[in-house]
Amino acid sequence: MTPPTRTRRWPAWAFLAPVTGYLVAFYAYPLYRNVELSLREYTVRSFVQGGAPFAGLDNYRTVLSDPTFWPTLAHTLVFTGGSLAFQFTFGMALALFFHQHFPLSRTLRALILVPWLLPLIVSASTWSWLLNSDSGLVNAALGVVGIEPVHWLTSPGWSLASVTIANIWIGIPFNLVVLYSGLQAIPAEVYEASALDGATGWQRFWSITLPLLRPVSAITLLLGLIYTLKVFDIIWIMTKGGPTGSSATLAIWSYRLSFGNLLPEFGPGAAIGNLLIVMALVAGLLYIRLERRQHLR
Amino acid sequence: MTTSRPRAWWKTGVGLVLTGLMLFPVYWMVNVSFTRDRDLRATPPHLLPTDGTWDGYRAVIDQQLPYLGTSFVVGLGTVALTVALAAPAGYALAKLRPPGGRALSFVLLIAQMIPGIIMAMGFYASYLTLGILNTLPGLILADSTLAVPFAVLIFTAFMYGIPDELLQAAVIDGAGRLRTFWSVVLPVSRNSVVTVSLFAFLWSWSDFIFASTLVGGGDHQPITLGIYHYIGNNNQQWNAIMATAVVASIPAAILLILAQRYVSMGVTAGAVKD
């Protein structure tokens, strides 16, 4: 009755064949195409007809020596760092709060997920209107306390902060959910023991919760980093990276070069894209290592 | 719970306030969608839609229905493609343990980390050559990449829990692998199919970057582009823009109501296993 191992193995890969073919066609090939784009000098014509000359690392040199490179990299770091720090802090505070289980806590926790589930264009346009210079609610509220209206989206000094605020709002639910599930994994006995020792709530947080939550926190932050590096929609919809590039990140710059101009520059656009991939992959490999280590415990 | 009642309700109060703060922008979207044109620029803004109007929603019905239809079709296509690709793969990875299965799971994990802008650029170049720019099948294929790796991971985790005895019973009854999959594994995994379908639909519905790069110049554009053009062309009528945004949020609301417990699972799927 038992079939030989050979026929046992073959059907397994038959079930995997579609997805494997799919991965090659729709992940590996676009990635390859992107690397190829970044190594050649493309024009609109050669993009369609082929035959673009090989340019080596020229596109990368162009990008790195562009005067907008360092500011854009700095915006990317500020956007990512600011988003992660605040999303994590708020997410942690909410997770600790909801972990106390009170009437309605389940329902409220589910409702807080809404910002994460909304299409990004919805969130971005809502924030655009909230932060509108003349008619936005935020400036109206500031006016009540006597603060002059701020040009959130249209002044170079504020645009990056504005898109970061919107992105923090979108990311809090994710941090809440992951940290909450991490809190649930901490056995209650640990807390009971510390309660006998007379530890206060704050002491318990610093000496028990936070250390035990370290693996989950690291994973949350790394996944957050990977997601935040990718962010494009929110910034593009709210400010298009402007004014004068003041809220442009690497993802925005790459898009602008390839799709945002009448005369696309696919080569440099792809080169920036590949820099982004390298950053995401470093974070990704770190994440996988952490994840494995946590499983071994 | 041993906490005394009044204390617990005090926490509920704080919880309500926090939830209210988090959801305030959503409330504001709804409020603005009902605001009359002449009140849009009122100072101070009207906090309640007391003199509400349905004009914004009338504009949605007049102008945005084709976009909504396109999004719906693309969403269904993405769901079908995602489940068809990912369910068999999940079954194989969970129950058949083929050589190289671990490596494939690893690749899927990495695949989720590639920035959308890079995928979009690669797709654009290929689609141009293949002549499928500005077509719905092209957009469905691209949108499915948002969901397939996640879907395989979910199916694998779910199907891992199916008791082996159940599958062996099917084999003893003379069912082949394909029959076992179709008439035992899939029906038992109904919940995971629902979860994956809901997320695949939501992500395809919410997609902006593939839509703007791959079908931005075509006749069939999804609702995300509908809103985007709206903001661009018509930046006075924010009640109509916000009404469209409210309508575009309906799938997210349905997801939350129908599948509340799976949503948390979906969020944490990549992060915290078991």
Image (tube, coloured by chain):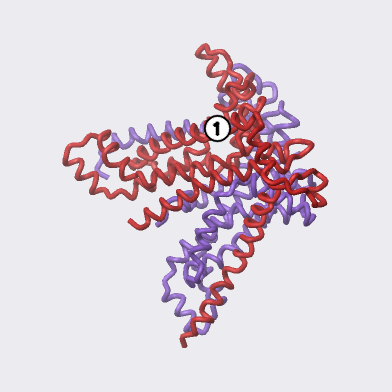
Q: A254 or A56, which is in the foreground?
A: A56
Q: Is B266 left, or right, of B133 in this rendering?
A: left
User: What chain does mark 1 sit on?
Assistant: A
Q: Position of residue B137 (x, y in %)?
A: 73, 56
Q: Amino acid at mark 1?
A: Ala
Quarter location, residue A228:
top right
Residue B182 in the image: above or below residue B155: below
Q: Residue at x 65, y 49 (%)?
A: B119
Q: Indicate the quadrant where residue A156 lies.
A: top right
Q: Indicate left or right for A156 with A172 as reference.
A: right
Q: Is residue A70 visible?
A: yes
**In this rendering, is residue B264 above or below B177?**
above
The residue at which mark 1 appears reads as A166
Let me know if residue B265 appears in the view: no
Quarter that holds the N terminus of chain B: top left
**Dot 1: what SS?**
helix
Q: Position of residue B217 (x, y in %)?
A: 78, 44
- Give me the chain that's red: A
List x then y, in percent, for residue A207. 26, 39
Q: Badge 1, how many Cα within 10 Å: few under 14, some, many 20+?
A: many
Q: Residue furthest bottom?
A: A1
Drawn side of residue A179 relative to residue A251, left or right = left
Q: Quadrant of the C terminus of chain B?
A: bottom left
Q: Residue at x 62, y 23 (%)?
A: A132
What shade does chain B have?
A: purple
Q: Nearer the viewer, residue A166 or B13?
A: A166
